[in-house]
Amino acid sequence: MVGAACALYAARAGLDVTVVDRGPVAGGTTGAGEGNLLVSDKEPGPELELALLSNRLWTELASEPGLGTAFEYDPKGGLVVASAPEGLAALEKFAAGQRTAGVVAETVTAGQLHYLEPKLAPGLAGGVYYPQDAQVMPTLAAAHLLRASAARLLTGRTVTGVSRSPDGAVRGVRTDRGEIDAPAVVNAAGTWGGEVAALAGVHLPVLPRRGFVLVTEPLPPLVRHKVYAADYVADVASDSAALQTSPVVEGTAAGPVLIGASRERVGFDRSFSLPVVRALAAGATRLFPFLEGVRAMRTYVGFRPYLPDHLPAIGPDPRVPGLFHACGHEGAGIGLATGTGQLIAQVLGGRAPELDLTPFRPDRFAVHEEAAG
Amino acid sequence: MGTEPAGPRGGPSPHLAVVGAGPAGLAAALAAAERGVRVTVVDSAEAPGGQFYRQPAAALGARRPQALHHQWRTWRRLRDGVERHLPAGNITLLPEHHVWCVERRPDAPREQRPCPPRERRPSDTPGGFTVHALLGPAQEEAVEVRADAVVLATGGYEKVLPFPGWTLPGVVTAGGAQAMLKGGLVVSGRTAVVAGTGPLLLPVATGLAAAGVRVAALVESADPKALVRHAGPLVGRADKLAEGAGYAVTLLRRRVRTLVRHTVVEAHGTDRLEAVTVAALDAEGRVRPGSERRFACDTLAVGHGMVPHTDLAESLGCRVDADGMSVAVDDEQRTDVPGVWAAGEATGIGGAALSLAEGHVAGRSAAARLRGREPDPREWAAAAASRTRLREFFAALDTVYVPPAHWAEQVTDGTVVCRCEEVTAGAVREAVGELGAGDVRTVKLLTRAGMGWCQGRMCGPAVAGLAGCAETVARRPFARPVPLGVLARAGETGEPGGAPVVSEEPGGPPVE
Ligand SMILES: Cc1cc2nc3c(=O)[nH]c(=O)nc-3n(C[C@H](O)[C@H](O)[C@H](O)COP(=O)(O)OP(=O)(O)OC[C@H]3O[C@@H](n4cnc5c(N)ncnc54)[C@H](O)[C@@H]3O)c2cc1C
């Protein structure tokens, strides 16, 4: 997704773009996650700024002819609920901070919850409504952004090396099917971004954080917003390797309800884990009791690309002239893709990026940190 | 929640769960029960027998099921053997149990194969397997069976490739037609065409003819003469090996026009099937222009072979061969996951006789190992020998009975490929040609082909063929759709203290 967005904005900035991927379009984490474009789960800071920029750009893209429907853009809004008064107080405090950063956050009383979401469980303490939260279908979004970019697309090609000129500057990439010359290379290899960085001889400690998503049978629209419990925010920001499963429940244009997502650090282990999806199901049915009788059709697994400080790497790599990074977006790479693409296009074109890239500097991790992270 | 016999830890004998009550599953159950293992057989059908020994429902008054069951005596022996073990509870049959997942509990024994010599029985070690099932036909109530080991004997399902008009009422799968025959549901007086490829077409055509249906043509895209080249001397014994081939051929000669190297290019009709167009194939597997012929018919039974059922094995972590899309097993029918055996068509398509042999070996091996003994393969030498022979024969069949190489060219853009989600061939082609899909998974994500009720079981091979990419082993952690309420409580039924523990972050409960 991130690569597709970089391609789109770079092409629109007038650059000649080639996209190389060892798999098909969206064959990495993009095809294995969900498409929430969330501001609601982010605390004030660089990631929230990037999310606000990105959501604005998503809205613009969605209004281009045909594009919004093609990737199933839905500005449905998010609803965060708390079951107990203490949770609600914490949520309120969190939302107050977000408002100062430009997030629209509307307090919802216990009594109002059922106007927004009639099928919610009774007895919840209240919540906060975030109208800026939206949703896309990630695989369609990646495919249609690439198509709109008109970039040259080379799928089924693995990058095996980064070519450098004697002065150290990037000259292009080597692939298993020939070389590609380019004065600038963007590493948008997601969870494998660390490996691609290593090909250029630099250190970038991207690691996988596993997530399962549950998909139900198609239903009429019964869940209107993205709904999640307040603990989700804590899970997202958590440093823990242990399993966390506060569910986000959302309907989709195609009918199925998506229940996502667990977070675990277990390497690239693809094996099915019944305890994990059981916990997701339990959480979802607690929020929406009617889901008890709804059938889960399938479940899939993906690996979020994360960096030790949970911020992506975006921008030029001072260690290798001509190398740019756009990876490590963890559980928000769909949402943050547009902003990332725009910023990369700006720096590729030699312009000043519209957000300060310092927090996203790719060389911010000392080698020894990898062992700690 | 259902109940089940007391767990093995308190009881005297180890407990084996067999999933599937076809020839393989029953043979495994019988072999294991006769060697002191308590067996529970779980199957979705109302009665044991599987696809092959499907029980003609008594109510429908099928008088001579033998006419359809060439190996009726074998079946009787097997069934009587199993029944002998029922009263004492050595074998428990659980029909109408739809297994949605077999879980290897986290506390299951972790030792790697080959089994080290050890004194402990696996049943003495904590943990094991939980077979999660839904009680049919509503499939809402959960039943859990805990066992020390499992035999997966889940069989196979039919492969059907699309062509224009294949979704018309009146077009059925060959296996569906056969099931109707065995269930006594075929209406005489109709006119049928049987088409596709594979040894299943013969018994379907003859069965239909015997039931009073006029079979206008049997259309086989392969050239069975090639079988002689591939299988050599085995062919002479085909009638003993395959499902009554000899008997089928006689009947065929009498009544049915057979067209080899031909294929159905289109089914016609407005509300239902009225006719089919059939054409000859050239050496490359393309339709020969001008060779088209039309047959009026109200039934078209079509099949392109069988595909092994691998879902349960795959989510248990068993290796599945991408080649044959079948569960990989060793000489003892063990998968590469300790405690999990597989037998019958789940390990490769090969008919009832092969399934019986594999099931027998699996049951004996499992029994020996569950009782802490290294099995002696000489004990099952006869079964192993017939297994070898049959596998060779079916490997030869496999090379001959393949769909025409260029079948996808006949599929028009407007033809629906995925029936659950109504995805057309044109949409699949667009995903590949214009949106950068290069594999079945991306086609699925871009078009929704394979996301519906059947989860791609029907359309998987077709989508791969149209997309021009290799078929991959599908991952379907839920072998059946499962209510979220059941899923949320999975593991809570059965023995106390058996539920796996989910590690959670110390400070934060996962959900409110
Ligand atoms: C369960 C789950 C739920 C999620 N939900 C959301 C959500 O709701 N909202 C959200 O915004 N995000 C979500 N995410 C996160 C999001 O999916 C990721 O952040 C995002 O997809 C990352 O995109 P990417 O382009 O960086 O990486 P990818 O999509 O993984 O793309 C990287 C590409 O690089 C290619 N590649 C790697 N190495 C090489 C090489 N050597 N040569 C050539 N190509 C190579 C790969 O093939 C791959 O296609 C979720 C993730 C998971 C797992």
Image (tube, coloured by chain):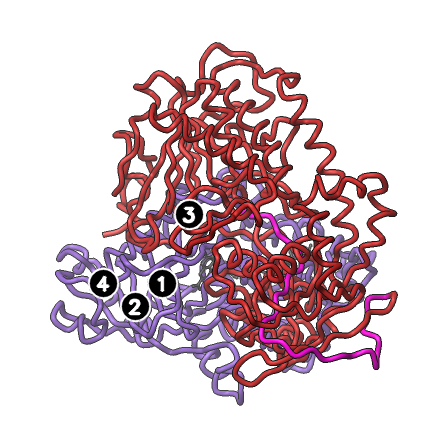
Chain colours: A purple, B red
Name the chain under label 3. Answer: B
Q: Residues within 10 Å of mark 3 (few under 14, many from 20)?
A: many
- Between disc 1 and disc 3, the foreground one is 3
Identified by mark 4, the residue type is: Val
Say which residue label 1 marks.
Answer: A42
- Between disc 3 and disc 2, the foreground one is 3
- Along the horizontal axis of the image, is A178 left or right of A337? right
Residue with the most extreme top position:
B119
Mark 2 touching mark 1, by CB under 8 A? Answer: yes
Identified by mark 3, the residue type is: Ser
Q: What's the distance in space between the residues labelled 4 and 3, CA to CA?
A: 41 Å
Q: What's the distance in space between the residues labelled 4 and 2, CA to CA?
A: 16 Å
Q: What's the distance in space between the residues labelled 2 and 1, CA to CA?
A: 8 Å
Q: Residues within 10 Å of mark 1 (few under 14, many from 20)?
A: many
Mark 1 touching mark 4, by CB under 8 A? Answer: no
Point 39% across, 74% down: residue: A134
Name the chain under label 1. Answer: A
Q: Which mark is residue A81?
A: 4
Say which residue label 3 marks.
Answer: B44
Front residue of A295 and B458 = B458
Task: Describe the element under mark 4 as helix, strand or loop.
Answer: strand
**Region of the chain picked out in magenta, as a range:** B284-310
Q: Quadrant of residue A119?
A: bottom left
- Along the horizontal axis of the image, is B391 left or right of B320? right
Name the chain under label 4. Answer: A
Q: Earlier in the sequence, mark 1 or mark 4?
A: 1
Q: Quadrant of residue A164?
A: bottom right
Ligand number 1: quarter of image: bottom right
Point 37% across, 32% down: residue: B92
Q: What's the distance in space between the residues labelled 3 and 2, CA to CA?
A: 53 Å
